């Protein structure tokens, strides 16, 4: 069995931001020497997520609107009694999820033609981390 | 380490459709010879998903209504400026997710008695693919 | 390749309840002797979920309110024609998902400082099961 572990750090300019990390994941897979296996892409925070969708700017704006509609900012979250103001970011994380796991076949990410991997920042403008972990043979 | 990779193709009659693929996943696991491991079931499209739930037709109709309520068809999605009309299918994919990963124990899918694996088509009536990848020993 | 499989059972006092199982998952990882790998944490029911978020009681109450708002109890779910009354629990399960997969690095869960693993019960007061499966080397 082979494995490879790679960390990425983000410090987004905007409060919410969606960053295409497909090339970085593909690079970790290539350097791991793994032909058949799986790669886990996992945000190390509870106010960020990872998802697979289309690299189309209109769609990313639709996704952002939709996440704000389903998990909106609200003053009155109980979580805000702790002094935090990011309750909505926790709920957006639950909706999108913090991780995806992707197949590796013949040494490549085994994705469909439109599938791109995104890091979704919901509470940015500070240092955040993500782990990419490949495993296989 | 052993691994097995199997592709399925779908071409649904309806625009949205939910297809029980548990037997196909179980068959890939059985043929892989893997006793202990995991199996990834992943749609290769950004307008389809995979989920685990109950094989009950009333519930599947409830799920379909619920997905349409939370991620409805709308003319005005920005994504539609590209000529597409399937913005809602992308959002339904985000809600349901494109993949599940399931445990393999003693050569079998280690699921509870009511857990069934579904391919969820949100933009059908054309050829779509899914990958099943098992890994273990 | 090494693997380890551990089952947990729950019988919650409340209909809905959120239980921090991070220590139990960490213990399975430690006892497995796996240095590099992944661990799957998967509810064996279609009316329960697993998620990763913050161990903060106000936030857990916010999450519960939010799940009830997005996937509410309703008399009129078609699923209830079978005699069941837990249609909302199935939808909450779809929203939260039944599983997470976590990286293992240097023999430890490779999580961020605030990430805690929760079992989310949506239809409790009876015996439910969960499987923790670690795999790696």
Image: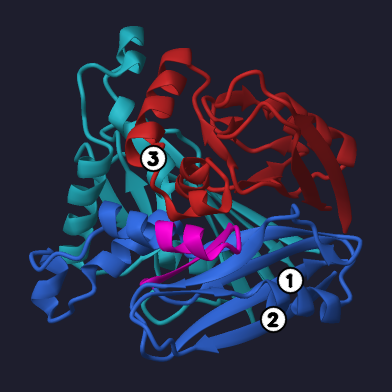
Chain colours: A blue, B red, C cyan
Count of numbered tags = 3
Q: Position of residue A109 (x, y in %)?
A: 78, 63
Q: Secondary structure at mark 2?
A: strand
Q: Chain of mark 1?
A: A
The location of residue C124, given as percent across then percent down, is 28, 35
Q: Nearer the viewer, residue A5 or B96?
A: B96
> Residue A5 shows which numbered tag?
2
Q: Earlier in the sequence, mark 2 or mark 1?
A: 2
Q: Is residue C105 above or below residue B133?
A: below
Q: Which mark is residue C86?
A: none
Chain under disc 3: B
| Magenta range | A46-62
Q: Horizontally, is B96 left or right of A52 in the view? A: left
Where, by quadrant of the figure, is residue A65 drawn?
bottom left
Q: Residues within 10 Å of mark 3 (few under 14, many from 20)?
A: few
Mark 1 crowd level (few <14, some 14–19, many ≥20, 10 Å Cα) = many
Can residue C51 be seen in the rendering of this structure?
Answer: no
Nearest the camera: C55 or A96?
A: A96
Q: Which residue occupies 18% across, 79% down? A: A84
The quadrant of the image that shows the N terminus of chain C is bottom right
Please report contact status of discs 2 and 1: CB closer than 8 Å, yes or no: yes
Residue bearing mark 1:
A134
Residue B10 to residue B132: above or below: above
Q: Which residue is mark 3?
A: B74
Secondary structure under badge 3? loop
Q: Chain of mark 2?
A: A
* SS type, badge 1: strand
């Amino acid at each position: 069995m082979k494995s490879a572990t790679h960390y990425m750090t983000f410090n987004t300019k905007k409060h919410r931001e969606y960053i295409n990390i497909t090339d970085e994941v593909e690079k970790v897979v290539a350097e791991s020497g793994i032909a058949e296996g799986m790669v886990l892409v996992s945000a190390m925070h509870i106010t960020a997520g990872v998802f697979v969708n289309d690299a189309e700017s209109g769609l990313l704006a639709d996704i952002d609107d939709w996440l704000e509609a389903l998990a909106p900012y609200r003053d009155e979250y109980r979580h805000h009694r702790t002094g935090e103001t990011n309750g909505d970011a926790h709920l957006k994380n639950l909706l999108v999820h913090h991780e995806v796991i992707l197949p590796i076949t013949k040494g490549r990410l085994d994705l469909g033609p439109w599938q791109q991997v995104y890091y979704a920042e919901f509470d940015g403008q500070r240092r955040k981390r993500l782990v990419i972990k490949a495993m296989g043979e």
